[in-house]
Amino acid sequence: MINLIEIRRQLHQIPEIGLEEHKTQKYLLTIIHQIIQNKSFIQVETWQTGILVYLKGSQGQKTIGWRTDIDGLPVEELTNLPFASKNGRMHACGHDIHMTVALGLLEKLSESQPKNNLLFLFQPAEENEAGGKLMYDGGAFKNWLPDEFYGLHVRPDLKVGDIATNEQTLFAGTCEVELTFVGTGGHAAFPHTANDALVAAAYFVTQVQTIVSRNVDPLDSAVVTFGKMEAGTTNNIIAERAFLHGTIRSLTQEVNELTQKRLTELAKGVAQSFDMTIDLKLKQGGYLPVENNPKLAKELMDFFRNETKANLIDIAPAMTGEDFGYLLSKIPGVMFWLGINSEAPLHSQKMQADEEVLDFAVEAIGQFLDFKANRN
């Protein structure tokens, strides 16, 4: 039997950025082959740094998929844990917990051949390159496309034992925005001979806030945030270029596309009014809203509520993003939150998970996947 805590701590020490998860993949494959040895009904394939583990069912009428993400974040860890990462990266989003739970579920579900097929997906690049979309579009599922897909994400402010989801949208769709205003630099004493990109960018940041207040239906939800601005070199030189880096978030794809459209129009309008050019890049890719299938979500919620020790919470949507939304736009399924009881939030340098969640998650989620895998 595999040691979940030891595995989690080993994974926690080797976080890697998306599509660079080579050590992670090697370690996962070592544990996977340990679990599946001498089990002829299980096959393993790799796709770049991802892994697919397929359990062929004795009846095989449908395929149930379980997805976990495997990448880390470019965050310097400050937890002071004895097994803390020291490579300048961190599993600050809890993917080490995700992977460990998936391995525990694989061990549990492979004890005997299931009736239905099972697919365990260890997916790279959730944080930066929408690895789910890359794998789907790249044909990774050509032999083993699930009929239903399930996955989880840890949530620090929920306790161990809490599982939270809903029958609608769980996470927002997100779109990355990169915008550069290009004007003409000059001396601060002679502003009339220059064209100040910093002023144009600042004006744009204030105007773009009107998209949500004046273009989005008040009953819908959207967020436009610019978290980074770079312009100028010193106090007495007018900036020739100003760079803005931001994000759009919404609970429906329709609102996301509307917000992208209005942001583009505003950027062009501000550039024209200041007699400047712009370079605008909008990157949504696979980060679509995570929309749970209502029927499957109700089934999952009823099962956790009635058949396990989980404290099932019907929770409101969150503006966090997840590339599992792309897979759920192609394959019906459900994502849910898993409580880990951490004082620090997701993506924090001090985020810590209560390791008691490992046994709980494998037991409760294992009961659900066993139910799905062995029902007639």
Image: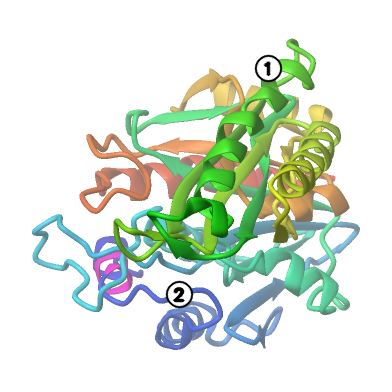
Q: Quick check: can you spot residue 56?
A: no
Is residue 132 positioned above or below 29 on the image?
above
Dividing the picture into quadrants, the one containing residue 238 is: bottom left
Tell me if mark 2 has few (under 14), some (14-19) or many (20+) residues whose alpha carbon lies within 10 angstroms of its own: many
**Circle nearer the N terminus (2, 1):** 2
Dividing the picture into quadrants, the one containing residue 168 is: top right
Where residue 193 sits: x, y (%)?
Answer: 56, 59
Where is the N terminus found, in terms of image quarters? bottom left
Q: Residue beneath label 2, please?
A: 17
Q: Is most of the magenta stretch helix, strand or loop?
A: helix
Please tell me the numbered disc located at residue 213: 1
2 vs 1, front mark: 1
Where is the C terminus found, in terms of image quarters? top right
Instruction: State if disc 1 and disc 2 touch (CB < 8 Å).
Output: no
Where residue 129 sits: x, y (%)?
Answer: 63, 68
Tell which residue pokes out farthest to the top in this image. 219
Q: Tell which of 298 and 133 is nearer to you.
A: 133
Dividing the picture into quadrants, the one containing residue 169 is: top right
User: Is 163 positioned to the left or the right of 156 in the image?
Assistant: right
Q: Which residues are magenta?
A: 8-12
Please tell me the numbered disc located at residue 170: none
Q: Tell which of 328 and 261 is nearer to you.
A: 261
Name the residue type under label 1. Answer: Ser
- The residue sitting at 49% across, 66% down in the picture is 107
Name the residue type under label 2. Answer: Ile
Tell me if mark 1 has few (under 14), some (14-19) or many (20+) residues whose alpha carbon lies within 10 angstroms of its own: few
Q: Quick check: can you spot residue 160?
A: yes
